[in-house]
Amino acid sequence: MRVKAWIRKRAARILSLGLFLVLSAVNCLPARAAETRTGITEIRLDISSGIVPGSSGGQVSVSSDGGNFRVGTVEVLNENDDWIGGMTPRISVELYADSGYYFAETGRDAFCFTGDAASYVTARRKDNKETLAVTIKLERLENGDLTLTGARWEEADGTAVWDHNPRARRYEVRLYRGNSSVTSTRTANDNYYHFGGSITRRGDYYFEVRAVGSGSEKGDWISSDSWYVSAEKADDLSDSYSYDGPGDGHYSDNRGPGVSDSSYYGGQSGGPGVRSSGGAGGSPGVITGLGNHWCLDQYGWWYQYADGRYPHSCWLCIDGKWYCFNESGYIRYGWIWNNQNWYYCGEDGALLANTRTPDGYYVGEGGIWIP
């Protein structure tokens, strides 16, 4: 009886040991399988971008110099494909590990970029670490050539005119008589500025103008030819501008800040940067998302409502600041004649009030110029 009991106990121990070894082998299978692959710890990518300011679209190519992986899909992430200075293109790149390899690292230090300037944003692994989706930021686009040409006078009304540069966000212009400055530097959103109200005496007049890009980038000043204005002509020009103030351009809207009505807004389609569902209509190409938000295209900043409409030919308060929109829906800058008063909108387009303007004039409550 004792022998049989001993045999039974011995058999149970052997069976338990066998089960333990089997379970241990099963638990070790995934670890051993992972160990059979080689981890990729360094990712070298060569970037070549065809995106330039003033262009529409543009290809970005990405290649690798070995590294036991290959480059797959390259996608430009920016919604706007009409490029202007100041934009920063972003791309998404998918990388696929070779057989027997996996991506062991995803941090910034694992990446090295050559070719065009680029920097790491983020990366994530999928497909058992055999696919890596990388987001890369390219270098900020410069404005490019901000040179202006064609500075000339329209002598009928004293308007300074120059050729439009599509890379310019706006222009700065100033008037001279002989060797003396007549006006301070003024801001123009279009390629002209009315100086008739400042031409009050006879003499040789000329103007200087330069293009302003995004940020602080500015082109060189260019000068127009001199235009001799007689005393009689000067009287005619100044009389045609009955409102003498710090600015010389007139604005046809007879409303002031905060006054607008539904007739001042565009329809569901068309207008700056809005594309219809069929891809046609509208002007220079921004496809916008949902919600009220600011939009930027090569002609400037504008504002879109969630339903696709946009304000134009009016003033509008947005996030506590007043902005003036021209007839095309773009915000205006500098001096604005409106509702029998002069107002000044700064470099960000917002109305200035209870302060001095960059050219030294004081604007009081509501932004009205106080002589």
Image: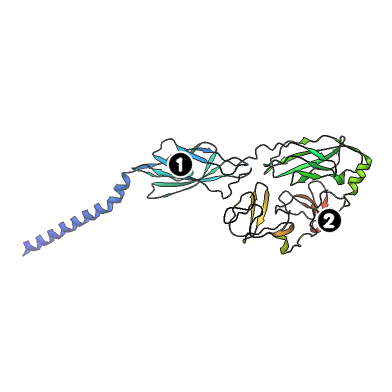
Q: Residue furthest bottom?
A: 1
Element under label 2?
strand
Q: Residue furthest right?
A: 232
Residue situated in front as seen by the camera: 111 or 306: 306
Who comes first in sequence, dot 1 or dot 2? 1
Residue situated in front as seen by the camera: 218 or 108: 218
For badge 1, the amino acid type reads Ala
Image side of residue 8 versus residue 148, left or right: left
Q: Are marks 1 and 2 in contact (CB under 8 Å)?
A: no
Image side of residue 52 versus residue 162, left or right: left
Image side of residue 177 versus residue 316, left or right: right
The residue that label 2 is drawn on is 341
The residue that label 1 is drawn on is 110
Colour scheme employed for the rendering of this structure: rainbow
For badge 2, the amino acid type reads Asn
Q: Position of residue 360 (x, y in %)?
A: 82, 47
In front: label 1 or label 2: 2
Q: Position of residue 209 (x, y in %)?
A: 77, 39
Element under label 1?
helix
Q: Position of residue 337 (x, y in %)?
A: 81, 53
- What residue appears at the point 75 percent right and 54 percent down from the top-left corner? 351
Category of crowding for the residue at label 2, using alpha-carbon neighbours closer than 10 angstroms: few (below 14), some (14–19), many (at least 20): some
Q: Quadrant of the image for the N terminus? A: bottom left
- What residue appears at the point 89 percent right and 47 percent down from the top-left corner? 238
Could you tell me how far apart the alpha carbons at marks 1 and 2 are, in whole angstroms?
60 Å
Category of crowding for the residue at label 1, using alpha-carbon neighbours closer than 10 angstroms: few (below 14), some (14–19), many (at least 20): some
Number of numbered labels in the structure image? 2
Q: Position of residue 371 (x, y in %)?
A: 87, 52
